[in-house]
Image (cartoon, rainbow, N blue to C red):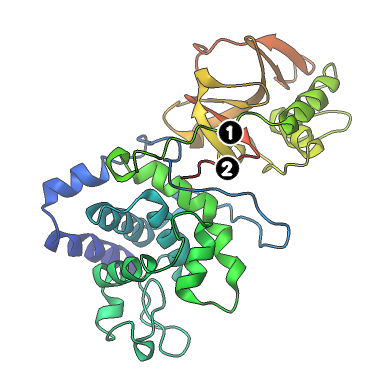
Amino acid sequence: MRRWLVGLLVVGLLGGLIAVAAIASLLGVVGSGDFMFGAPCGSVLASTDPHELPPVAVRVSDLDPEQRAIAELIIAIGKQRGLPPRAWQIAIQAGMTESRLHNLHYGDRDSLGIFQMRPSQGWGTVAQVTDPVYEINKFYDVLLRVPGWETQRPGDTAQDIERSAFPLRYHQWEPLAVNVISTVGGDVTQYVRASCTTPLPAPSELAGRAIEFALGEVGKPYVWGATGPNAYDCSGLMLRAYQAAGITLPRVARQQYWAGAQLPVRQAQPGDLLFWGYDTSNPDSIHHVAMYLGNGRMVEAANQTVPLRQRAVSFNEPELMPLAVRPGVPVSRA
């Protein structure tokens, strides 16, 4: 109950900034079936260094009401200030690391709030650093003074602001932050610089290695839950194919959907992953994944009735998700 009340309070505080109607326009209408797919240019999902903590498998739908409200407020204030999506991502990653996006009234020594700001270090009064609107604006004020924040990795900028004894921990929230922006960020066009036109990187030679592995397994049996070497299910085949190319994917198809750069399915290139869901507007309904080979062909572990196979694929197929995923590349770089 406390978190529901805090969540409502956080959203309510935004009313002092803009009208309720403007909030709806600013945040976009977000429901259980409304997804804004793809990460906007200016947000970054970088490759993970082996020495870092692994990314945390938290989906947007896993956030509680207070976390969701604070994430939406971070984006709304970022938009109001005309800041690009990279700034929102930095704030979300910092907030998840410091408080799990909760407005805490306790912390190490005198650390408080979303970003664990310390009144004794000049961040503001106790009342201020536990006021979500003040906290977020103060975070952005400090962010804008960080040299190179627009081009360096978001977690590094979060560390420049927070000065943690554990600087690498901010990186683990990259996938979640990017997906929050994609899901609740709405139209970001006016908040992205006109020069931010970097195209999605082309499939690398790693994709070729993944294709080679997958094609080499054609003819083996489908077994639900199997990950090779003698049998596979759909996501197990993708897991091992990209593992052979040096890229680690999550185990199941629904998680693999968030494990790379997303692009319109009709722009899929060899090595990209295709997904099928019972509800194509809801990634939580994904039940199948396959690898696109180009020229209208794909390779898949379909079901128990057929062995692993190549087959023709149409982008008009029922249940085909509107986005393909390109593993192993940045989502975008400004």
Label annotation for residue 209: none
Residue 183 lies in quadrant: top left
Looking at the image, which is closer to me, 91 or 314? 91
Q: Is residue 319 visible?
A: no
Looking at the image, which is closer to me, 61 or 92? 92
Circle 1/circle 2 CB separation < 8 Å: yes
Identity, as a three-letter code, of the amino acid under mark 1: Pro
Q: Which residue is mark 1?
A: 201
Q: Is residue 46 above or below residue 255?
A: below
Residue at x 46%, y 66% (from the top left corner): 94
Q: Residues within 10 Å of mark 2 (few under 14, many from 20)?
A: some
Which structural element holds mark 1? loop
Mark sitting earlier along the chain (1/2): 1
Q: Is residue 305 above or below residue 55?
A: above
| Horizontal arrangement in the rendering, residue 262 relative to residue 327 (left or right) | left
How far across and how far down the image is residue 301, in percent?
A: 73, 22
Residue at x 51%, y 22% (from the top left corner): 265
Which structural element holds mark 2? loop
Looking at the image, which is closer to me, 168 or 215? 168
Between the residue at mark 1 and the residue at mark 2, the CA separation in whole angstroms equals 8 Å
- How many callouts does the rendering have? 2
Q: Residues within 10 Å of mark 1 (few under 14, many from 20)?
A: few
Q: Which residue is mark 2?
A: 330
Q: Is residue 255 visible?
A: yes
The quadrant the N terminus occupies is bottom left
How far across and how far down the image is residue 201, in percent?
A: 58, 33
